[in-house]
Image (tube, grey):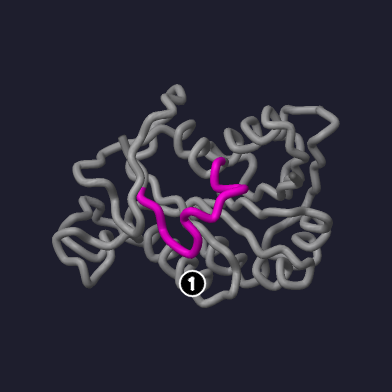
Amino acid sequence: MKLLILGATGRVGSELVEQALRGGHHVNVLVRSPEKIQRNVDNLSIFQGNVLVKNDVIQAMHGMDVVVSALNTDGTTTLSESMPLIIEAMQETGITRIITIGTAGILQSRVTPEVLRYQSSESKRKLTRAAEEHHKTYEILAGSSLDWTIVCPTYLPDGERKGKYRVERDSLPEGGARITVADTAEFAYKQIDSLDFNKVRVGISY
């Protein structure tokens, strides 16, 4: 399979690249700084560009089967601004499947089910800017015709892949407090050829 991975130099994105390459897939990455990709293998193609430039996105997306976005907020609006461009590029190139990495903040609250976790007392974070950005992105995807899945990890430390974790549609597994970068990437990677969680947010934790 041919995959476009966005956010490939981030923590989850770089792990996704490694897992996809080990799985024998051809991987395209679109990055602003190609020197940050410390790999030189035949099944990896590196495109220098910006996710806010539609032509850059289309160039990297051409010929791909699935888009995987591990873009993060970094205190900017890049995440929500880039998603409409990504969706337009997917429609123009005939790609229907996208997996993105979100945050547990955009899952439904257990204590106040009519709102999202970041909007409720369930969230311990005082700053909600990142969650708001992920929320906008979720709404944009939900309004599209794409086959989308948003993987929503809670506290995300580094650590080895365990391969055992809990997932739940639209909610964080009860009592969930952490999930490593590696296991988050593994679950997202498994969604590449699966529609088990199509058009839903998926909470993931140990």
Which span of residues is magenta-colored?
190-203
Q: Which quadrant holds the N terminus? A: top right
Spot occupied by residue 186 in the image (x, y as percentages of width and height): 51, 36
- Above or below 197: residue 119: below
Residue appearing at x 73%, y 49% in the figure:
30
Q: Nearer the viewer, residue 54 or 74?
A: 54
Asked whether residue 197 is drawn in magenta, I would say yes
Residue under label 1, please give it: 142
Q: Is residue 43 left or right of residue 142?
A: right
Query: With respect to residue 165, does 80 lie above or below?
Result: below
Q: Is residue 58 left or right of residue 183?
A: right
Residue at x 62%, y 32% (from the top left corner): 19
* Left or right: where 12 falls relative to 176: right
Q: Residues within 10 Å of mark 1 (few under 14, many from 20)?
A: some
Q: Amino acid at mark 1?
A: Ala
Report if residue 157 lies within the magenta region: no
- Report x, y in % for residue 114: 22, 72
> Percent position (x, y) of residue 153?
38, 45
Q: Residue furthest bottom?
A: 143
Quadrant where the C terminus sits is top left
Marks counted in the figure total: 1
Q: Position of residue 132 (x, y in %)?
A: 38, 65
The quadrant in which residue 146 appears is bottom right
Name the residue: 20% across, 67% down. 113
